[in-house]
Image (cartoon, helix red, strand yellow):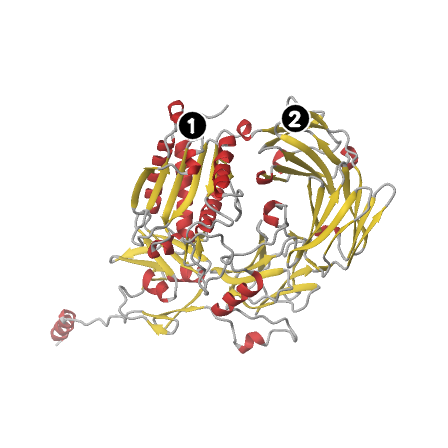
């Protein structure tokens, strides 16, 4: 009997067994079940991988596979993501973010970690009941969140896509295609295209740094970090009245930490650490606010980012409530109520009522002082002559919806000082220039200032602005006005026209006004601060001139409302970031904004080439193509042979070959070859010069590609790699 039982049990093990397979993992996008997937989602190392194209194209994102890089490029709204097979690093708008696992190719399908990628593109991910749910973020309407808001809390409204188009067209943008000058190839912008941003200007004056007055963080202390559970950000409130403006970021539980990043173009990013958000997109902003735009996104899995587009010169304070559930951004909006002019025996005074000195930025020019008044509301506007000892005319006009400019015409040898003469009153005092203790050596082109006890110059730490398009260079020093005074020193040598010494609150400005493009070198010895005025070739061993083609009234090719001049400038700005980050090459651009460089097209083209001839080692003109044949696509590189080629190791043809090869390698575009041409910018150039065509705007598929940040960054990388390779052929200046 015992033997029978043992045999029976052994026989059971020999019988075939049936294992119940787990059902496939489902995939639901915005409430719809995705069918006929190339591969179902899979779990690897406790993380979910999904087919990239099927998921994100269903969400309205663009998805491109770059075989040479083994990378997936995904774009959605203002988020650009690059996922590289086998790498944990996810690139989000150029910034690296670590993923828990890398993307993989499984059964010939590109599978990517859905959590890390989707949240950085602005989507929400959930996994339950063996199903992956991916949804677009929506405004939270859960009653428990809304009940947390204090009574009468500032409202917020997220724009729909249609509202966003109408909002920007009506309030902050202008139709860029109404007044173009007779080019038959220019197509009108479609009605559904958001036009380009418009920045008002001052007739006869080009303001520095794009007329942007830097915003300033006036917070006296950082918000300390505290370890709380993950908080949910569910509300952003905006003020409804001018005056004291306070913006609110509200979470459902205490916030662990807050970091801020203020960029040069006055974008303020506030990062809420250890948080998620139920918000995504742009808020509707009333026109009177000091922020022209606010956007919310899930920046990483654990960071919520709120970006404020601040107006010029905005001063702000960031704080947090005692319960750490509300972050505040406070801005004090000033109101210019009156301007009075008084001519005294020894000085003239301009009294601004309702303005504090911190709101003013001054830009001296020949015979004029421009006072930019930021973060300001006023109904005043005038242009009137005055009978002063130093001022002859005053003009006040709007620079933007939140900034004014006071234009003061002055006599020669007039200095100025900005004084606070009341709680909300600022006085501009004009008086005879009194500069002293400033010595200029014409032969050595060197400025010497006797050292002030206790003040040492660290050249790397001195704030400066090289405004070479205006032939101007500004240094900001601590306030040493009692040692060197004020006023304009006329120089008049080949490089430098004059030096203006100006005073601003807590600082002294040295404004070098040039006759041509120049640069400065700062040093000090035992007795003097020494500032050498140099031609760029005297200081920099490698100089490249970057020429973003077209600009201003000449937009170049226009297709689907996209202007070639803007694409050219976009690539140039990305290229400049690469060059400046490396520091191996000094770059100058023929233009840094949407401007035309001459009265006529011929003058414009000659001016571009002459700009490079004067200071550069090579000239690179950036363009995009267009043709009647809409099937034409790919890249071209143009050069022109020169009699000077016999005397140099880097010829225009060699530079063209290097550029073209790097473009092909990086972009993978159709090869339309290196070509010789007699284009004006090549014909007038006396340094090695090329003209790059980076793609055809007339080809619908190629236009969609070249209008992406991914393509523009790749083009910038290709051009920069080519520059480094080409400079190996150029003997370095000693």
Position of the N terminus by quadrant: bottom left
The circle on residue 470 is none
Q: Position of residue 676 (x, y in %)?
A: 34, 36
Residue at the farthest right position = 345
Q: Is residue 592 above or below residue 90?
A: above
Secondary structure under badge 2?
strand
Asked if residue 484 lies left or right of residue 619, the reply is right
Q: Earlier in the sequence, mark 2 or mark 1?
A: 2
Which residue is depicted at the point 79% across and 48% down? Answer: 386
> Residue 433's quadrant in the figure?
top right
Q: Is residue 559 above or below residue 575?
A: below
The circle on residue 730 is 1
Between 324 and 393, the one nearer to me in the picture: 393
Which residue is depicted at the point 29% across and 47% down? Answer: 670
Which residue is depicted at the point 58% across and 54% down? Answer: 199
Q: Is residue 623 above or below residue 402?
A: above
> Residue 517's quadrant in the figure?
top right
Q: Position of residue 65 (x, y in %)?
A: 32, 54
Q: Position of residue 270 (x, y in %)?
A: 57, 58
Residue wearing tag 2? 446
Between 75 and 564, the one nearer to me in the picture: 564
Between 342 and 553, the one nearer to me in the picture: 553
Q: For residue 706, say whether it is visible.
A: yes
Asked if residue 286 lies left or right of residue 671, the reply is right
Quick one: label 1, few (<14), some, or many (20+) residues within 10 Å? Answer: some
Q: How many marks?
A: 2
């Amino acid at each position: 009997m015992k033997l029978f039982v043992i045999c029976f049990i052994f026989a059971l093990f020999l019988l075939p067994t049936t294992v119940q397979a787990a059902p496939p993992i489902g995939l639901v996008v915005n409430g719809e079940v995705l069918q006929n997937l190339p591969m179902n989602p899979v779990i690897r190392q406790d993380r979910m991988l999904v087919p990239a194209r099927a998921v994100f194209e269903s969400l309205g994102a663009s998805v491109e596979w770059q075989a040479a890089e083994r990378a997936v490029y995904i774009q959605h709204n203002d988020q650009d993501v690059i996922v590289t097979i086998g790498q944990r690093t996810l690139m989000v708008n150029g910034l690296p973010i670590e993923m828990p696992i890398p993307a993989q190719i499984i059964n010939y399908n590109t599978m990517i970690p859905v959590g890390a990628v989707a949240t950085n593109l602005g989507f929400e991910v959930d996994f339950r009941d063996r199903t992956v749910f991916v949804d677009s973020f929506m405004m939270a309407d859960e009653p428990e969140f809304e009940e947390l808001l204090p009574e009468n809390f500032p409202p917020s409204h997220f724009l729909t896509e249609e509202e966003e188009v109408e909002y920007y067209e009506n309030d902050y943008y202008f139709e860029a295609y109404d007044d173009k000058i007779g080019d038959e190839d220019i197509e009108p912008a479609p009605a559904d295209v958001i036009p380009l941003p418009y920045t008002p200007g001052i007739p006869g004056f080009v303001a520095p740094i794009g007329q942007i007055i830097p915003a300033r963080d006036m917070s006296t202390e950082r918000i300390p970090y505290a370890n709380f559970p993950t908080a949910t950000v569910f509300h952003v409130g905006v003020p409804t009245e001018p005056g004291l403006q306070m913006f609110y970021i509200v979470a459902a539980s205490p916030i662990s930490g807050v970091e801020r990043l203020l960029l040069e173009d006055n974008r303020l990013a506030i990062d809420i650490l250890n948080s998620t958000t139920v918000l995504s997109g742009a808020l509707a902003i009333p026109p009177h606010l000091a922020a022209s735009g606010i956007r919310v996104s899930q920046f990483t899995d654990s960071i919520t980012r709120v970006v404020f587009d601040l107006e010029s010169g905005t001063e702000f304070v960031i704080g947090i409530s005692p319960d750490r559930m509300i972050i505040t951004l406070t801005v004090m909006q000033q109101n210019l109520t009156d301007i009075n002019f008084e001519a005294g025996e020894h000085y003239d005074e301009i009294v601004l009522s309702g303005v504090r000195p911190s709101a003013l930025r001054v830009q001296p020019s020949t015979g004029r002082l421009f006072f930019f008044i930021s973060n300001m509301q006023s109904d005043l506007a005038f242009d009137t002559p005055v009978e002063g000892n130093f001022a002859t005319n005053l003009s006040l006009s709007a620079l933007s919806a939140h900034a004014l400019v006071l234009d003061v015409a002055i006599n020669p040898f007039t200095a100025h000082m900005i004084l606070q003469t009341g709680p909300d009153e600022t006085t501009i005092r004009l008086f005879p220039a009194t500069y002293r203790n400033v010595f200029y050596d014409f032969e050595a082109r060197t400025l010497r200032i006797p050292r002030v006890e206790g003040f040492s110059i660290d050249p790397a730490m001195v704030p400066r602005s090289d405004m070479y398009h205006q032939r101007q260079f500004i240094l900001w020093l601590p306030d040493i006005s009692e040692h060197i005074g004020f006023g304009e020193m006329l120089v008049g040598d080949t490089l430098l026209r004059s030096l203006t010494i100006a005073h601003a609150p807590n600082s002294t400005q040295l404004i070098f006004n040039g006759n041509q493009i120049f640069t400065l070198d700062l040093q000090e010895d035992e007795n003097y601060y020494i500032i050498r005025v140099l031609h760029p070739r005297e200081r920099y061993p490698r100089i490249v001139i970057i020429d973003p083609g077209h600009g201003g009234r000449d937009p170049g090719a226009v297709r689907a409302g996209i202007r070639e001049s803007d694409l050219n400038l976009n690539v140039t700005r990305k290229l400049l970031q690469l060059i400046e980050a490396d520091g191996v090459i000094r770059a100058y651009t023929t233009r840094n904004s949407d401007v035309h460089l001459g009265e006529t097209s011929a003058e414009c083209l000659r001016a571009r080439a002459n700009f490079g001839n004067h200071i550069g080692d090579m000239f690179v003109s950036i363009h995009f193509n267009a043709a009647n044949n809409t099937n034409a696509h790919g890249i071209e590189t143009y050069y022109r042979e020169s009699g000077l080629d016999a005397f140099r190791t880097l010829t225009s043809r060699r530079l063209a070959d290097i550029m073209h090869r790097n473009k092909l390698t990086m972009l993978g575009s159709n090869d339309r070859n290196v070509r010789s041409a007699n284009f004006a910018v090549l014909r007038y150039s006396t340094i090695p010069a090329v003209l790059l065509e980076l793609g055809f705007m007339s080809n619908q598929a190629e236009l969609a590609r070249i209008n992406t940040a991914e393509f523009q960054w790749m083009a910038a990388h290709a051009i920069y790699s080519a520059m480094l390779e080409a400079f190996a052929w150029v003997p370095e200046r000693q």
